[in-house]
Amino acid sequence: SSKIKGFLFPPYKEKGALLTVICALASNELEVRKLVEEQKSKAVTSEKVLAMDMYGHPTGIRSIALSSDDNHACTVSKSILKVWNVASRSCIRSIAPTLEENQSKKKSSTLYGLCVVFLPGNTHLVLGTREGHLLVVDIASGDVVFEEEDAHEGAIWCVDVRNPNPQQQNVTLVTGSADKSVKFWDLQAHQDEESGAVHPMVVHTRTLKMTDDVVAVRYSHSHDPSKRMVFVSTLDSNIKVFFDDTLKFFLNLYGHKLPALALDASDDDTILASGGADKSIKIWGLDFGDTHRTLHGHGDSITDLRFVKKTHYFFTTSKDGTVRYWDGDRFDQILLLNGHSAEVNSLAVSRTGAFVLTGGMDRQVRIWERTRDMVFPQEEKERALEKVFDKIDRDEGGSAAILRRSRGDNDEDDEQAEDMEKADEPQSEAAVKRSILSVASGDRIMECIERADQELKESAAFKKSQPGKSRTPNLFLLGMEPAPYVLWALRSVKTAELEQSLLILPLSHIERLVYYIIVLLRKGQGVELCSKVAIFLVKTHQNQLIANRTLNTPLRELKRLVKLRLFESRNVVGFNLAAMKAISKFAAEQKNANFVSDQPQEDIWAELGFGSDVAAALQGDGRKRTKR
């Protein structure tokens, strides 16, 4: 009945069977089958002896809904719908949704559920399917009591319910589909002709046509009919806001690079949060439609987003397998929850925020409960960054391995070389552990090098197309030439973080940086900093630079320029020191020309290592004047 993931031959055989085999299926089932040989035709056939099914879903979970009293939860997968008791963590109902016309057939075709929601009263469910049908399911009996066939011409991706209020007693549903439409449905009572039982039914009332496929749709939480809004996310990466009573267009929220797959509004309808396939979360103000902040943290598409009631805190799930807890006022991540082994598709938050349900493609339903432990967001950030850096260090083999690779001593095949390296391993190592500032500085240097390269290409193309004309300075380079712009980037890095930042650069960027250092040294700009960077890069990446034959000539030129500029700088420093000594001597002579002091003159050059000639001369001059 499903794909076989594994099999086993038991040590026993069934009666009259040639062979017995136990098969593990992809649908979370175990089947025991026996091979039987027919007497007449001598053909071998298989017969099912036993089947064992688990509580869980056979395929990935697509949607989760929670009842208003937080007692029951409903999960939907490819062809099955399960109702759970939250307190006991047990499955109380398993339903395979089918249409009434298919139930009379021997081989009924089940429907692919995509979204589900509890109706007020928590006795019935509304299920939206990929085939475009809308079903009303009775939880007690597990039957489909009403079906709206072809409610949409495409897959129904989302469904939401507007709860009744004192002004409006009727219950309204809204559905969004791939057929570029949003439909509104009223809930009415329907009496079954056979049993006479009264069940709810949905009646189509209004349709809102969109320009693209509808990905997500949600109601706002306002009880005022004139202020209640409908949020619609479409495939063109826009979010449109309409008034519920008149369907009048109100706001168009744009900023996502890819479609927003999930959205939700806070209880006070002041902010709207949306998560998209571009891995970003945007928080919007519903007064003017402005973007308050864009949050990043997930490593893949964001699949669901829900606010905690009466707060501005919200949860998000993603295809990266994580659940994250955010603060919508401070724009910070509070918690990172790991546990799922595959992408997480949906979540449901309790009315008090005491627990959260999540489900994903690993066929798990996880319950996250709130504890009394204090959480400090800054510590969580630091802990997450430490994990990232530790993982990078483990992948690279630690700082000692980085130094050995930089020296070219990592001969892994020779066991003797490894033993010698371990014995001669230095007790103190270079500080190559990355920090937040060094990573940010390294990224900034790489970005500046790329901008400088792009400016060189554009400048060369401009000279070819328009010879003799001057090009407007590039504002991205602060009006500077490429080489001085790279020097400005190096100067913007703190001295303590410079070496760690240079270790982050890949070899391709190091080659370009060597080129710009040569250009700067030829012009005599930033001699001290350029020499320091060049010596560090050559010392760290010596083997890689020597192995690259294209760098032989630039390295020779770099060596000549560094020696030349450092020799010139040394001469300038020596000349300036000599001038300062002469000026100091002249100033002392002028000061003591008409002043006689009994105290001996101090040698101001003794600490600098220039001898005591000046002090001796001054002391002798003072004695002569005293005798006179």
Image: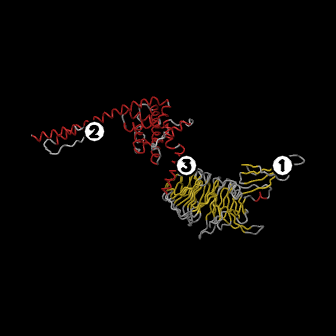
Instruction: Tell me the element at label 3.
Output: loop
Dot 2 and dot 3 residues touching (CB under 8 Å): no
Q: Nearer the viewer's eye, disc 2 or disc 1?
A: 2
Task: Find the residue positioned furthest to the left.
Answer: 628
Instruction: Tell me the element at label 1.
Output: loop
Separation of marks 2 and 1 at Cα, in angstroms: 101 Å
Q: Circle 2 is placed at which residue position?
A: 609
Amino acid bearing label 1: Leu
Task: Characterize the local packing of mark 3: few (<14), some (14-19) or many (20 or more) Cα atoms within 10 angstroms.
Answer: some
Separation of marks 2 and 3 at Cα, in angstroms: 65 Å
Relative to 452, does residue 84 appear above or below in the rendering?
Answer: below
User: Which disc, if any, is residue 18?
Assistant: 1
Q: Earlier in the sequence, mark 1 or mark 3?
A: 1
Q: Nearer the viewer's eye, disc 1 or disc 3?
A: 1
Instruction: Tell me the element at label 2.
Output: loop
Q: Residue at x 72, y 60 (%)?
A: 95
Q: Circle 3 is placed at which residue position?
A: 257
Provide residue 367's location: percent of width, then percent of height.
Answer: 61, 60
Among the 4 quarters of the image, the one containing residue 535: top left
